[in-house]
Image (spheres, helix red, strand yellow):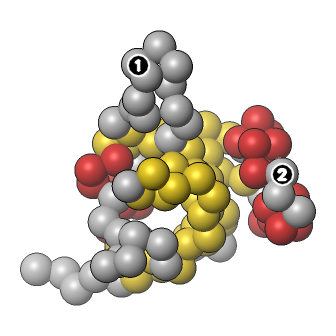
Amino acid sequence: MNAMSWMPIRYRDFYDIPRLFLVEHAGAVYIFDCPFDDALDDYPPYYRVYRVPPELIPAADSGQWESLVRVGTFVGQIPAEVVQFDATRRAAIDDSVFATL
């Protein structure tokens, strides 16, 4: 069994788990987005994942995360249940999630 390799995340929007977070992996920056769905009256059971240019990260620092999603390149969709968070669910994810993208 492979050992977990924790990657730090930065998040916004939290309900049970981070619903919008970014993480750096292999020299790229990824946004995991799981916005509230009014039609479901709940959060969807998956994240939509986008790759964004690292030079746009200052937009995250200024609170403009939604704009990052709009300019990001869609990479894929993964079930939220496969994203393994650290015990706090606020600091890191296991990098194995990238094997599923």
In the image, what residue type sits under mark 1? Leu
Left or right relative to 80: residue 58: right
Place of residue 97 in the rendered image (x, y in percent of width and height, measured from the top left): 36, 60
Residue under pointer 2: 64
- In depth, the one of 32 and 99 nearer the eye is 32
Which type of secondary structure does the marked residue at label 2 adopt? loop
Left or right relative to 92: residue 25: right
> Going from the N terminus, do you reach mark 2 or mark 1 first?
1
| Total tally of numbered discs in the picture | 2
Place of residue 95 in the rendered image (x, y in percent of width and height, measured from the top left): 39, 71
Q: How far apart are the alpha carbons under marks 2 and 1?
A: 25 Å
The image quarter containing residue 87 is: bottom left
Identity of the residue drawn at 45% across and 42% down: 47
Identity of the residue drawn at 36% across and 83% down: 5
Place of residue 3 in the rendered image (x, y in percent of width and height, measured from the top left): 22, 85
Residue under pointer 1: 40
Quadrant including the N terminus: bottom left
Identity of the residue drawn at 76% across and 36% down: 70
In the image, what residue type sits under mark 2? Gln
